[in-house]
Image (spheres, grey):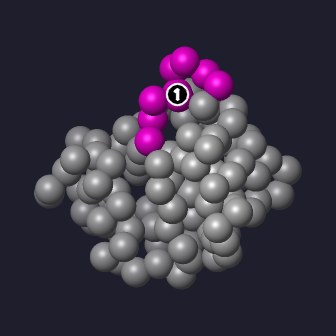
């Protein structure tokens, strides 16, 4: 079963995203901050990471840089999510290794589509 790590500091968004992905048949891990997310990525080695950009302490860009610089995690597709994605922010994320983005609030269809795109999963 493909696994997804969701890193999001807003409890309702984290919980809803986890519930949706579990309902779709994925193994899902959740982290409420960037530091914990980096640790979980190293421990769990998920097949996909979805990470909020604006978080306290360790933001999504820092998470992306930490994981991209490590040989064990750099190949994991990384999707950024944010309520605010302008061209400069998106370029910043993509040049650091992000594969795609989700604009909050996203729909169920948008979430499932991006997950399936990077996991090559049609379930």
Q: Is residue 96 visible?
A: yes
Who's the residue at 22% across and 47% down the image? 120
Q: Residues within 10 Å of mark 1 (few under 14, many from 20)?
A: some
Q: Main secondary structure of the magenta part?
A: loop
Who's the residue at 69% across and 62% down the image? 89
Res. 46 image quadrant:
top left
Q: Position of residue 69 (x, y in %)?
A: 65, 25
Nearer to me, 54 or 5: 54
Residue range of the region highlighted in magenta in the rendering: 69-77
Who's the residue at 64% across and 67% down the image? 87
Q: Is residue 111 above or below residue 58?
A: below
Nearer to me, 103 or 123: 103
> Quick one: quadrant of the C terminus?
bottom left
Farthest residue, direction right: 57
Farthest residue, direction top: 71
Q: Is residue 76 above or below residue 60?
A: above
> Would residue 7 appear left or right of 61 to someone viewing this image?
left
Q: Position of residue 27 (x, y in %)?
A: 34, 47
46 magenta-colored: no
Res. 20 image quadrant:
bottom left
> Would residue 84 appear left or right of 18 to someone viewing this image?
right
70 magenta-colored: yes
């Amino acid at each position: 079963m493909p696994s997804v790590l969701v890193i999001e500091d807003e409890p309702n968004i984290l919980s809803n995203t986890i519930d949706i992905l579990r309902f779709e048949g994925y193994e899902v891990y959740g982290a409420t901050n960037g530091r914990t997310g980096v640790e979980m990525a190293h421990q769990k080695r998920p097949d996909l990471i979805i990470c909020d950009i604006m978080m306290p302490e360790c933001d999504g860009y820092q998470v992306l840089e930490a994981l991209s610089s490590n040989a064990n995690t750099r190949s994991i597709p990384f999707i950024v999510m944010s309520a605010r994605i302008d061209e400069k922010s998106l370029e910043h994320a993509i040049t650091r290794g992000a594969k795609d983005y989700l604009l909050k609030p996203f729909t169920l269809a948008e979430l499932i589509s991006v997950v399936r795109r990077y996991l090559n999963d049609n379930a």
